[in-house]
Image (cartoon, grey):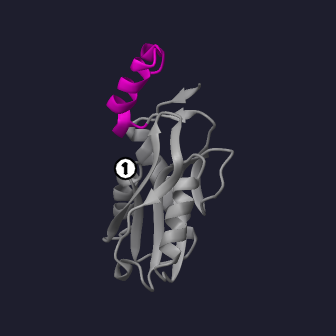
Amino acid sequence: MEYITPSWDDIFEMCVEGACKVIEMGVKFDVIVTLSRGGLVPARIMSDLLEIGEVIVVDVKYYTGIGRRSEKPIVREISKTLVDSKNVLVVDDVIDSGESLKAAVEYLKSLNPKCIKIFTLHVKPHRVISPDVYVSETSAWIIYPWELFECYKELKANGVDVRKIF
């Protein structure tokens, strides 16, 4: 398996690039909805760059480990009033298979938003949903700076020589 490890500076630069593309869309977003846990950091940065004060976290469980998924994503519900009739920017770190994001977007659509647009840092080539804005495409497994210990621990337990990755 191939791995990439973007730095904090890389992530910030990707968010700046993404924010510029989002602004070019010409939509004034009322709220950011982010998928926990991967989207939390990019959502906070995008909130600052786009001056969107309201950030809502939607919990979607799909991955059970590196490269391992459960049967289907499960979305934890939020209050309809949080997105009803609002322009929603959904932010996540990566679209891998896209199943988690697809489930979240389908759920959000049921809450009557005015519009939904999607921003991610990375996308994988074989995905079931595509964002409106993304910065980079890769087939590698991405190890973000906010999950270093989690990934390091699991990779080492699976016999991977982590010195070659980090």
Which three-letter amino acid code belongs to the residue tagged 1?
A: Arg
The residue depicted at 52 percent of the width and 55 percent of the height is 100
Q: In the image, residue 94 lies at what x, y percent? A: 52, 48
Label 1 SS: loop
From the viewer's perspective, is residue 12 above or below residue 141? Answer: below
Instruction: Read off the magenta span.
Output: 144-166
Between 59 and 93, which is closer to the camera in this rendering?
A: 59
The residue depicted at 35 percent of the width and 82 percent of the height is 81
The residue depicted at 66 percent of the width and 55 percent of the height is 128
Residue 8 sits in which quadrant? top left
Q: Main secondary structure of the magenta part?
A: helix
Residue 144 sits in which quadrant? top left
Q: Which residue is mark 1?
A: 37
**Name of the residue lying farthest toward the front:** 71
From the viewer's perspective, is residue 23 above or below residue 120? Answer: below
Quarter holding the C terminus? top left
Q: In the image, residue 10 lies at what x, y percent? A: 45, 40
